[in-house]
């Protein structure tokens, strides 16, 4: 068993990860592993925990980026009262998709409304 193997066993990629996270030299970590095994264990456990929470945060951020965009356009038909919201990538129809009304079919830019 080596310090490097112990780090890998704790779920870390290698001892270099621990060097980066603790800003301790590889030699220091090896010394701890030999002379202060309890300290080394705590350090490795801490690094593994931090690494995990980093990964979670990344997933969180990714999820937030995947969240559906806010609608940008809203349409309303005065004839049949049909209304629907569309986001930027949607193709907004020029006439009411329900009754085909064109003149009384309004397309609102929701961004404009929010700024008012
Ligand atoms: Zn309509």
Image (cartoon, rainbow, N blue to C red):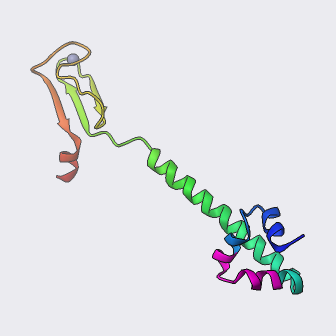
Q: Quadrant of ligand 1?
A: top left
Q: Is residue 4 above or below residue 97?
A: below
Point 81% across, 81% down: residue: 30
Q: Quadrant of the N terminus?
A: bottom right
Question: Between residues 110 and 66, which one lies in front from this camera angle?
Answer: 66
Q: Quadrant of residue 43?
A: bottom right
Give the side of residue 99 with respect to residue 50, left or right: left
Q: Position of residue 12 (x, y in %)?
A: 73, 64
Work out whether residue 9 or residue 52 is closer to the camera in this orientation and state it. Answer: 9
Q: Position of residue 52 (x, y in %)?
A: 67, 61
Tell me if 28 is positioned left or right of 91 in this view.
Answer: right
Image location of residue 46, percent across then percent down: 73, 73
- Residue 20 falls within the magenta-colored stretch: yes
Does the segment drawn in magenta span residue 11? no
Q: Magenta segment, which residues?
A: 19-31
Residue plotted at (41% across, 41% down):
68
User: Residue at 61% across / 63% down in the picture?
Assistant: 54
Instruction: Give the residue furthest to the left.
Output: 103
| Residue 5 falls left or right of residue 89 | right
């Amino acid at each position: 068993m080596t310090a490097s193997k112990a780090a890998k066993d704790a779920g870390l990629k290698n001892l270099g990860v621990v060097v980066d996270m603790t800003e301790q030299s590889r030699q220091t970590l090896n010394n701890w592993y030999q002379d202060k095994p309890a300290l080394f264990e705590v350090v490795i456990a801490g690094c593994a925990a931090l690494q995990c929470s980093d990964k979670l945060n990344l997933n969180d951020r990714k999820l937030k980026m995947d969240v559906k965009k806010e609608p940008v356009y809203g349409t309303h038909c005065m004839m049949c009262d049909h209304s629907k919201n569309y986001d930027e990538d949607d193709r907004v129809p020029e006439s009411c998709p329900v009754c085909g009304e064109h003149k009384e079919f309004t397309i609102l830019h929701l961004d404009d409304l929010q700024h008012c």
